[in-house]
Structure formats: C-alpha cells, structure tokens
Image (cartoon, rainbow, N blue to C red):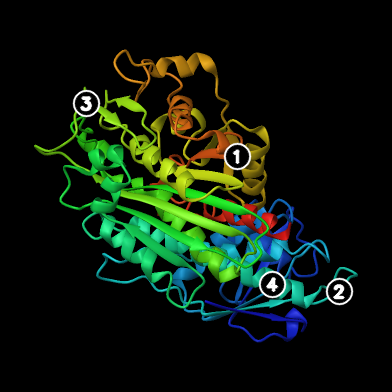
Amino acid sequence: MNFELTINPITSVEADIELIIIVDKNLDHHFVQDKTLLEKAGFSATQDETYLLIEKDRLYVGVEKVASGNVRTAIASAIRVLASTKYRTLKIASYMNNPKCTAVLRAMVEGFSLGAYSFDTYKSTKAKQPIEDITISLEEYSGYQLDIEKCAIALNKGEITADATNFTRDIVNTTPEDCYPAVMADIAKSLTEDSSLECKILKPKELRAEKMETLLAVARASRHKPRVIHLTHKPTNPKAVITLVGKGLTYDSGGLSLKPADYMVTMKSDKSGGSAVLGIMKAVSEMNLDVEVHGFVGAVENMIGGDAYKPDDVLVAKNGKTIEVRNTDAEGRLVLADVLCYAQQEVKADYIFDYATLTGASVVAVGHYTSTIMGNSDEVKEMVISASKSSGELATKLDFNNYLKKTLKSEIADICNISNTRYGGAVTAGQFLEEFIDEHHKEKWSHIDIAGPAFVEHSWGENPHGASGAGVRMTLRMLEKLARG
C-alpha cells in the first residue's frame, strides 16, 4: 500500500474511489456529495458505519468526532469493505482539525494499514487487498494551510508504526511448529540487516553460565532449546536509556499442570510480549529515535515429558532467590524473572518495561481489549497510560498492595510462583516480578500485562481476528516523546 500527499484539491485528484468521512452525522458538509441518496438508504453515519455507493465510486464512513482514535477505527472499517472490490486507487481529504497537530493524519495512515491486514500464510487462497495507492489531499479548506513537511513526517511514522504492528501480528499468528525459540532468534538477527540494530543470542550453554535456571527449567521438556535475545539500538547521544523485556513463550501447554484442551488452543499467542519487543525494536531503528533502546526476549517452549519441571520443585533464579513451584502453568513469570535479572545486569536503564500475556486474571479484571499496567511508580505507570491514549491502545492501572503480596509467601522457599488465593491474580503476578527488580530500577519499572488485547478471536476496532500487536504502538509513542527530550 503506497501513500502520497498532495496539496491539490480533492476534486482534481484522479482515483478509482473516494473515501469520505462524515463527522457527527453531518450530511451537510461540503465533502458529502450524495446527501439525498444516503438519507434514502437510511445511512445514519454512526461511528465506523460504512456505506458504499458503487454507482458513484464513493465510500462513506461515520465518525463521532475528528480525533485520532475515531478516525483510525473508521478508516480500518472502510478499508475492510473495499477488500471485496476491484478498486485499486483511493483518494481522501486530510480531515485534520489543527494546522500544527498531525495526529489525525498519522491515525488515518495507521487505520489503512492495520485494517487491511490479513494473515493467510496457511490458506490455499491468499487474501488480496485491491487498494494499492492512496492519495491524501492537504487542500486548504478550514482557513489554514497545513505544513506539508510535518504531514510527511507524520505519514512516515504512521507507516512505520503500522508495519511494525503487522510484523508483530505475523510472528504471534505463526504456529508453534513454525515459530519456536530458534526461529524467534533468527527473526531478531534478520532485523540487524541494513539497520542500526545489533543482536546477541544466548543459547543453553550461555544461559547456564548466566545462572538462568528458572528459564532453563521451564524449557527443559521441550525439543526446542531456549534462547534469550538481546537487540540494541544505540545512537550517539541518546536522550534516555530504555530496556524492554518480553515474554516469548512460543507455545505453552501448561507443563505438568496441563491446560484443558480448549485452553491450549491459541497458546501460540503466549509469545506476544516477546514479539512486541521485536516489532518495537524494528520501528525504533527505522525511525532512528534518539533514545538508546535494549530489547530482551526470553524465547521458550513449555512442554510435558519425563524431563519436565514439576510442582513441588524449588528453583533458584539468577538473582539467587528461591522459588517454590506450585503450578507449572505459571511459567511466564519464571522466564521473566531470569530475563529481567539479566537485562538489569547488562543495562542500567532510565526506564524498564516488561510485556507479557501473563495472566488470565488480567482479562477477568478489565476484559479482552485492555492492557493492565503495574509497578511501584505512579509517574512511570502514567507514562504508559498517556502513550496508550495517544496511540489508540487501551490500558489501565492496577495498583499493588501488601495484603496481596503476602499471598505469595512460601513455607519452604523465598517465594511461591502462584498466590494462595484465586483472587487478584494479575496483581500478584506483577508483585512476583517485582521481586526480580533491583534497587536501581525499583521506581523505574512498569509491568504491562497484554493478556487481554494481544489475541482476540474476532475483529475489533482496527484489529483483526487473532493477534493485534498489542504494546507496539503505545510504546513507540512513549519512546518518541522521550526522544524529543
């Protein structure tokens, strides 16, 4: 999909079809050319509602207001409608509501690319999005002239962001037979080609030398050996140093605490956190952001077998803390414990963020579409929440508390890998991870549980069935802000 900006009036732009946004059900706007036909058809122009006038080669879509979140989902809905047509070129006005703010333009570009996404790797008949070229008119129509250079930058960032999100979706959607730890490592290495990124891969020998025994225990019963990935983007004079850590469970059977059959379906999505880190690092390099960013991924498969780790085992994490295992399906936190320790050993960061499909309790708490944000610092948590709002992702804070922390107490080890209560599981998982954050990073860390939005089995907003690429867009917005200083 190719994008082009023009200062020419929308009426002079040649295209197979025009996409027209109707704001707040206003059919009297001068862009609306078919008011009578729309009224006759009963088109109400509610948010994301579409109406295709084939005889006029015009597609209408409704938005409640001109805001990036509304425009992004509306554009995604519109491009899906065109998937079954033969139109190849499209034109649209900019609909920007401020001469200095290009957020709506960026959202428009993201909406086109994110809405057009489909995963057809395993289908005999491949999906074909017919729209190849999109022209956006920056025609002056609201009493001000848009800065075409700033608009071009916004367009480019929108393309990079959407591409990184779709790249992440592809990894998550790939089956465990085709995407296991060594494959994730190969994907990471491929990102260093013709880019600013550097990559280091730790294999079992190096992992043992680093005393990452909890990660190795989770991986023990799989024929696919684990990997820890370290990607680095290091500009000359960075505005900040950031560490990202992702849970990369390429498949999670639950281990000996075996999941029920229905719960094993979609467990390819347990690598969503690690995949998000790879996608973020790709975009950071392409944007050449003026921040030093380190991306760590613990790539592991949790399987069953005679060599599997067991409930009742006591494991020793990299930082020396002992962990009583009472459920082998609480494996992601064991992997993250070691990777967090390793990441902090390697990098003293200004901020550290981890991403994981860590708990079903997060989904119970806030639903499928929202990430839960935890940590010790309100300032750091608010950074994530603010970025989520500007990116169109949904996120909310869950506060730690000492009463729940006590439920992780073990009688035979320093800590237990699950709590002794069925309630508050998202919070106790976050508080478990807190045990592996050192003093330097205690107030600089945030845990992001993406279990809800990472993989949903129906389309929603700008997201398709399956992987959404959760975490990518909001983190990029946060890193862009830090890069501006």
Instruction: Give the alpha-carbon distance from disc 2 to disc 4, as whole Å.
Output: 16 Å
Q: Position of residue 96 (x, y in %)?
A: 77, 64
Label 1 Cα neighbours within 10 Å, binned few <14 / some 14-19 / many ≥20: many
Residue for badge 2: 145
Residue at 69 percent across and 55 percent down: it is 481
Instruction: Give the alpha-carbon distance from disc 4 to disc 1, as whole Å.
Output: 30 Å
The amino acid marked with disc number 2 is: Gln
Label 4 Cα neighbours within 10 Å, binned few <14 / some 14-19 / many ≥20: few
Q: Are marks 3 and 2 in contact (CB under 8 Å)?
A: no
Residue for badge 3: 313
Q: Dot 3: what SS? A: loop
| Residue 403 in the figure: left or right of residue 408 | right
Residue at 80 percent across and 64 percent down: it is 29
Which circle, 1 or 2, is nearer the viewer?
1
Residue 51 in view of the camera: no
Q: Dot 4: what SS? A: helix
Please tell me which of labels 1 and 2 falls first in the chain: 2
Please tell me which of labels 1 and 3 falls first in the chain: 3
Residue at 83 percent across and 66 percent down: it is 99
The amino acid marked with disc number 4 is: Ile
Which circle, 4 or 1, is nearer the viewer?
1
Residue 418 drawn above or below residue 438: above
Residue for badge 4: 153
| Residue 405: mark | none
Residue 260 drawn above or below residue 154: above
State the image quarter where residue 92 is shown.
bottom right
| Residue 244 in the figure: left or right of residue 330 | right
Instruction: Give the alpha-carbon distance from disc 1 to disc 2, as whole Å.
Output: 42 Å
Please tell me which of labels 2 and 4 falls first in the chain: 2
Residue 308 drawn above or below residue 94: above
